[in-house]
Amino acid sequence: MSLAEALVVFTPSGRRARFPHGTTVLDAARSLGVDLDAVCGGRGICGRCQIEVSEGEHAKHGITATASHLSPIGEVERRYAAERGLADGRRLGCAARIAGDLVVDVPPESQVYRQVVRKEAEERAIVLDPVVRLYYVEVEQPTLESPAADARRLREALAREWGLEGLELDLHVLAGLQAALRTGGFGVTVAVHDGTSVSAIWPGLHERVFGIAFDVGSTTVAGHLCDLTSGEVLASAGEMNPQIRFGEDLMSRVSYVMLNPGAQTELTRLVRGCLAKLTAQLAAAAAVAREDVLEATVVGNPIMHHLLLGLDPTELGSAPFALTVDEGLRLSAAALGLPVHPGARAYVLPCIAGHVGADTAGMILAEAPHLADEVTLLVDVGTNAEIVLGNRERLLAASSPTGPAFEGAQITYGQRAAPGAIERVRIDPETLEPRIRVVGCEAWSDEPGFAEARVTGICGSGIIEALAELHLAGVLGSDGTIDGRLAERTARVVPEGRTYAYVLHAAEPRILITQDDVRQIQLAKAALHAGCRLLLDRYGLERVERIRLAGAFGSQIDPVHALVLGLVPDCEPERVTAAGNAAGTGARIALLNGAARREIEEVVRTVEKVETAVEPRFQEHFVDALAIPHARDPYERLSQTVALPARRAGGQRRERARRAGAAAGRRRS
Ligand code: FES
């Protein structure tokens, strides 16, 4: 007599088949290749295999599913529910058996390859597929008759229960093997790295392991601690890069290394110390043991990349900017001095060229221009701007030396974006009076609530807005000169030596925007614009349809103001958007998805590098881009939505000419 069968449909995959009554839901899922987690291998202890029955009539499948089409809750589930709790309607897939037609819903937390939610807009979904996986196994105990070594029996158990053949065992795993087996009653959890080696072992069931994605910038170093089993970011932290005392910008650090033998070791020690400190902070913030951190990924510009790895950055200081290594690197986390599990690994994303580093690789991974049809311009604005242009057919990359002005350095009242820094500015074109907002206070200066705000200086996004608004209000000409004639009309324009300044904050502390500040920003923005323009030339494009601004500064600046000033080439303002910390997101993607590492390694091999320093047209583009917004490009697409003063100036000129003509006519008559 054949066994009764039932139709079982899994959602969201939609996979379906008939199964004999009595089959466990986990076995049915496995036979269909449905993604259902099961760290403990079906022993009813991990709770990862939870499912729900989607009750009701499912006309599409021609069945009616009810919870009673599963075997009644038995001892295993009762025990699990008592110890760990099991929500209403939830069943353990490894314990519940099929007893009738079913539509089984596998919730996201029970999927191994679930999608991780990203907060950023226009996000690329991250599919969770980390290189570290946990497996619980029960190993046969040795006997006099069968005295095989513990390591051999562990390997056999992993092959038998999980189909994992030929695994290497790290030395420290061997060192802890016997104790773990005996403490765990011969049940242990192992961490398998990349399907090839056992990198950690714990007695009994061990359910969570963690990873940290590091973004090593020249100014700040950031880390995100993620749960490798859920993909969730549990803690984020940032620290100033302690190397900063050896120079604000990258080149001064390279010069320091060149001039001071042995300094490289010190810079390496400092940045590694910073990563170690962040690791401790992140683990404490997430209440996670550092020993449970098994994986780390790192992005950074080429010089930070070399210094972190202990490689000499001297060659990166001058043409031809030769990297020691550009491939993605797989290392032990201990080699980078990370205070985590001794078996933890680190992955350093590949560099693209001598000035285009692993941070740009991270940005590409996060923004995925190589998967899109539309050509996108990606710009990470920092001390050095990294620029990527292209789509699935072709990708170009360059970096442009913008200098630290965008970060508030070299600006008279400039400062980093910390509480008290002016970050938003609006200037009334009639009265020329400003309204400002500072970091740490939501109110504008003409709103109640601003009185308590402390004003300390102006940050990068603030200076961009201020200059763009001054330009729109007619205070700042296209050549970047503050119009001194306005001093007669407003107390906001004041003489400053042989030039003029604009008083942005008249109360104490008095904050001026000087002519020299304008020049610094003009130089920085011209370098950025010229880099973008070179890539467009190389690609054979006049215009780009979509621009993404990345990095802390890039994400802060208002797209319209960036366009008004001509930081980037003309584009529809609504097609210029913030990409958030794209490099850091790339590090997080590489942390959570092993395939992404292979993907970015392949993509960077195809990227065409454009070396701005030796491109003959760079200078020409640079000079044109010094003007606001640009000497030759009228920014037609921007002017559809914003009345640019070039037009108003033209109008004023025409008006002056008309009046002059009329006066001449009157004189004649
Ligand atoms: Fe672990 Fe079901 S597989 S409880």
Image (spheres, helix red, strand yellow):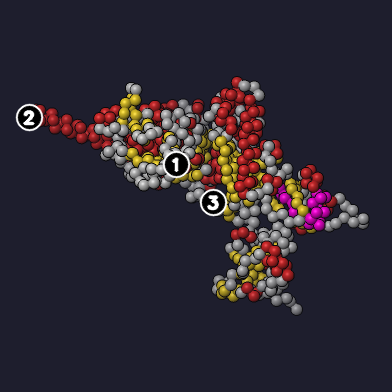
> Which residue is label 1 attached to?
439
Closest to the camera, between mark 3 and mark 2, is 3
On residue 309, the disc is none
Cβ atoms under marks 3 and 2 closer than 8 Å: no
* Label located before the other in sequence (1 or 3): 3
Q: Nearer the viewer, mark 1 or mark 2?
A: 1
Foreground pick, 517 / 146: 517
Secondary structure of the residue carrying numbered label 2? loop
From this viewpoint, is residue 380 visible?
yes
Give the mark nearer the N terminus: 1 vs 2: 1
**Residue 185 in the figure: left or right of residue 409:** right
Q: Does the magenta stretch include residue 225?
A: no
- Which secondary structure lies at badge 1? loop
User: Residue sitting at 39 percent across and 38 percent down?
Assistant: 465
Does the Cβ of the disc 2 residue fall within 8 Å of ligand 1? no
Instruction: Identify the element where label 3 is drawn.
Output: loop
**Which amino acid type corresponds to the residue marked 2 in the rendered image?**
Ser
Q: Quadrant of the N terminus?
A: bottom right
Q: What stretch is highlighted in magenta?
A: 177-195
Which residue is under mark 3? 118
Name the residue beneath numbered marker 2.
Answer: 669
- Tell which residue pokes out farthest to the bottom in this image: 1
- Who's the residue at 59% across and 75% down the image? 64
